[in-house]
Amino acid sequence: MKCSEELDRFFALSGNLVCIVDFRWRFIVLNSAWERTLGYSREELLSRRCIDFVHPDDWERTLTETAPLARESTSVSFNNRYRCKDGSHRWLQWNCSSDPSRRQIYAIGRDVTALKGLQEANQMLNSLITASPQAIIAVDRHRNVRLWNEAAARIFGWTAEEVLGKRVPFVSEDKRQESDLFNERALRGESFVNHELRRARRDGRSVDLLVSTSSTYDDKGNRDGYVSVAADITEYKALERQLLRAQRLETLGSLASGIAHDLNNVLAPVAMALQLFRTKFQDADFQRTLDTLDGCVEHGADLIRQILTFARGLEGERVPVQTKHIVRQTAEVLMQTLPKSVTVTSRVSGDLWSVFADVTQLHQVLMNLCINARDAMPSGGRLTISARNVRNDDEYLQTIPEASAGPHIVIEVRDTGHGISPEIRDRIFEPFFTTKEVGKGTGLGLSMVAAIVRNHGGFIDVRSEVGMGTWFKIYFPAIPPNRGEAAPEETKTLPAGAGELILVVDDEAAVREIAKVTLESYGYRVLEAANGAEAVAAYSSRRDEIELVISDMDMPVMNGADMVNSLQQINPKVRVISASGMIAPGKAAQTADRPSPFRVALPKPFTAAELLRTVRDVLDAA
């Protein structure tokens, strides 16, 4: 025991566990660090074997590691866990040697529980860094890369081996000044949270990032760099830009609707007055002038319908259309408006079949394709528009899944521009997809072309070669030739009235005046009202006389819908023609809680003939 006391005094201050055990693992000598580390009293430790305190999972391994000590004088090192009195376990790192002649083992154990925890935490941290979907990048105070995880390699395109120890590679020259300022602030200890940046990938493309940073420190507590966590938000930013474009388009649509309404009110009296002029002036030259004016008004009305189709999604009327006229007119317009460096030619078959289509939307398809062709030839080139009859045979049908059988016409728009690369050819009809610079394209043109063609039962074939140009072939089902063209309707005498009293309601004085002149010229009597409130007052005083109300819908003081509700309170059987550019042809507006009094919608601008026939049809249907 004297030796034990001396050893206790010698090792009393040691933080390591020191002991001598026999080959049966019974303690001969142990220091007080055992008590401090495991929490057992000296008597409790001496009453049991040393190995009894080893974690059960480490027992067999411990016996295997220490087996050589019993056979020869040697040394071994290993780690295992020892059970504490409170039920916890401590990791101990052992260095042991033996004296077989004395059948004793000499051991020193160091408590490495904290180090083991740090190692495990470090392993977990490394696993998290490796598995993180965000780029994790650490740089030193000289901006050399110290950490570059797999996500960084995936997002930016450089491997860790290529960037470790070097300056960050993803700063383009145009972002150099911004990057220098960002790094200066980060190295001064300023933290960034969800800071948006744009950097360059290895392939030259840009990547949008959401970055957060924090300073790093050396073992003396001095700031020695910073670490960044960067999320790739490129797709999110693209969606955000699309949403903003959609919101701008929605605003533009509302503005366009208002402009279209005002333009309708401008054209409406002109359209009606032309019919009156035809009846009063029979001179052939004057009639040709009226024909020209008729064409101008109709073209203006088509433009307004196109605006409303874009803004409100109104469906245009589909009628048999002889497409050769549209193709030739489009070519003529382009020859006058495109730069002189672009040569426009057209080739149209003389016996081109007709199609059932919305004329305005056909114009829209052609103009969108031709404008794209112009943009593809910034230095000039050749634009060719052609149209011909085709019958799709089985072999051709197999090459285009969307193709349908039967007679078609094909409209071809071909340019000699820069062409479409194979990588983006499959995306050109996606909404909002564009290769044009910001502000020079919405990405809606070709998607609208595809939607219109598809809604008409047609399909599109695109051929393109980079540097050689692009060829769009638009197929529309044709009216079978044996059905022929509908015979032009013979001019009929316009229907007249028999003294019926009609209330005309419109906030535009010109519209009211020309409608009044037209109706009175054909035997009707007319009352006028400039808004809904005036109309209600006029109807109240003469409800038994007024046979019909013709009303605009968008008016000050009281709009058309509120006016009709009030008229129905006076006379539930009131009859109303909605004369507005804001309602699609053939569709009547609805009131809130009653059957609609609208017998028909008469879209502006309308001609005198359309007005007179509609009025007569409604009155005769009563």
Image (cartoon, rainbow, N blue to C red):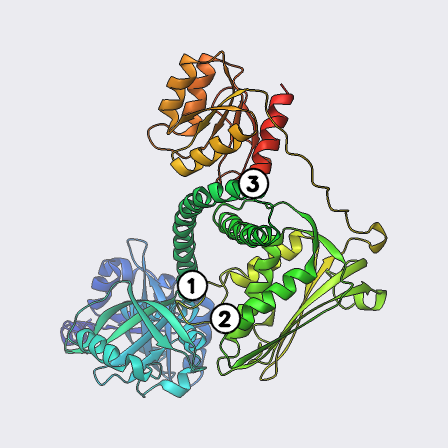
Question: Does 298 sit above or below residue 116?
Answer: above
Badge 2: few (under 14), some or many (20 or more) residues near its Cα, within 10 Å?
Answer: few
Q: Cα distance, mark 1 to mark 3?
A: 61 Å
Query: Mark 2 or 1 closer to N-term?
Result: 1
- Label 2 – label 1 distance at C-alpha: 34 Å
Q: Is residue 428 in view?
A: no
The amino acid pointed to by label 3 is Lys
Looking at the rendered structure, the kind of residue marked 1 is Ala
Would you call the spot at circle 1 few (<14 residues within 10 Å), some (14-19), or many (20 or more)? some
Q: Quadrant of the N terminus?
A: bottom left
Q: Nearer the viewer, mark 1 or mark 3?
A: 3
Q: Secondary structure at mark 1?
A: helix
Question: In the image, residue 210 lies at what x, y percent?
Answer: 33, 65
The residue carrying mark 3 is: 280
Report the residue marked by disc 1.
238
Q: Are marks 1 and 3 in contact (CB under 8 Å)?
A: no
Q: Quadrant of residue 315?
A: top right
Disc 2 + disc 1, Cβ < 8 Å: no
Provide residue 512's location: percent of width, then percent of height: 43, 33
Q: Is residue 470 left or right of residue 432?
A: right
Q: Examine the rendered structure and indicate whether residue 367 appears above or below residue 377.
A: above
Residue 172 can be seen in this image = yes
Pick whichever, 296 or 404, lies toward us. 296
Q: 506 or 201: nearer the eye?
A: 506
* Of residues 551 and 197, the one drawn nearer to the viewer in this rendering: 551
Q: Residue at x 23, y 69 (%)?
A: 214
Which residue position is annotated with label 2?
A: 337
Q: Which element type, helix, strand or loop, lies under badge 2?
A: helix
